[in-house]
Amino acid sequence: MSQPFEDLQTTPTAEELVDKAFSRAARAGRAKDGLDAQQSMLQTASNIASDNLENVVTGWPDFDDLDPFYRELADAVIASNTTGDDAPDIGGIDAVRQHLSEVGWASRKTADIRREYAERLANSDIDTATKIRKQAFARIADVVEEVEDDLAAVGAARDDLKTLPDIRPDVPTIVVAGYPNVGKSTFVNAVTNARNETASYPFTTTEIRVGHFDDGHIRYQIVDTPGLLDRAPEERNDVESQAASALEHLADGVLVLVDASGECGYPLDTQLALRDDLEARFDVPVLTVCNKADRSRDVEADLYMSVTEDENVDGVLDAAVEAVDHEPELPYDGS
């Protein structure tokens, strides 16, 4: 399953939608005469408004159908309102659902206006028909403008969610955690093609690094999480905490890298406290890996390696794969 929001189309503003509906209606009216022109203008304007509003709603995936990882991550992203100081207060996914519901109401209402005023236009003289059509236009504009803030909020949420990294919840995933400077990124780069596969989260100033490697006939995903799982939980803000929580749905195994030498700048007991928190939070195998083992092995760990010295890097990756213990789903042959 790919990033579920990458195909979301740009959300029009209320002003853009009204301008589009009425300019198209004017062109349609010029192509006909008399009552036919007024009827064509009404139908065109209402159809443009109603269809475009409906497309805003139907373009979004059902949040209830999303993988829990993306659902929780989306909730964190849109709640953070990262699009700028002038952006609307979007809220979480429940707020976006309400905004989409209001847009859906506006779509139905503009269709109702078309039916109501089409009946009034029938058999009217041209002067009366023109007045009726103008009244319908005013009501259509009022309805669209009534959901101006809803369209703005949906558009802002769309802009944020399109930038989410393409992480596949259906691929066995190893999350790499640990304090900064313990060698996480170096390890991920060493075992994957991650140099060409980085994607930025919109609510941090760092990057989440996503790489892949193959073991046998199985492709694995490995994720480095700077800004999320590289410091104590109490140091994360609410959005980062929720994003870290989303990773609990994604991970099939966790490698916690520690630096026993302390050269990373963090005391070993602080690093191990982070490891203990991750063990408590993730309901998957969590392996402690002492990196920079050529400098110090003064810690009880599941594995020891030195990425810079190419010592036991493959062994750590093999241990992670074994811990994940992924069984591929085989096609049912009916026998």
Image: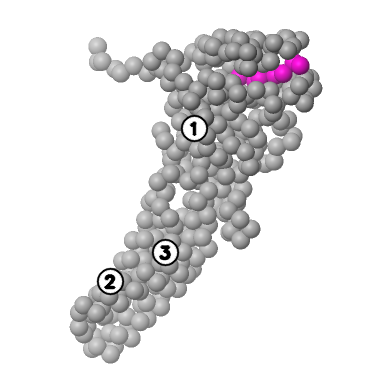
Going by the numbered disc 2, the residue's amino acid type is: Gln
Crowd rating for badge 3 (residues with CA inside 10 Å; few <14, some 14–19, many 20+):
many
| Residue 241 location, quadrant | top right
Which mark, by number, is residue 197? 1
Write down the residue under mark 3.
Answer: 106
| Prevailing SS of the magenta stretch | strand
For the point 31% across and 71% down, the residue is 24
Closer to the camera: disc 1 or disc 3?
A: 1
For the point 52% across and 24% down, the residue is 222
Instruction: Say if mark 2 contacts mark 1, CB within 8 Å.
Output: no
Q: Earlier in the sequence, mark 2 or mark 3?
A: 2
Q: Earlier in the sequence, mark 1 or mark 3?
A: 3
127 or 165, nearer to the observer: 165
Q: Residue 310 in the image: state x and y as whole percent.
A: 59, 13
Write down the residue under mark 2.
Answer: 43
**Magenta extent:** 255-261
For the point 54% across and 11% down, the residue is 314
Q: Residue 169 in the image: state x and y as whole percent.
A: 47, 29
Q: Residue 108 in the image: state x and y as whole percent.
A: 37, 63
Instruction: Say if mark 2 contacts mark 3, CB within 8 Å.
Output: no
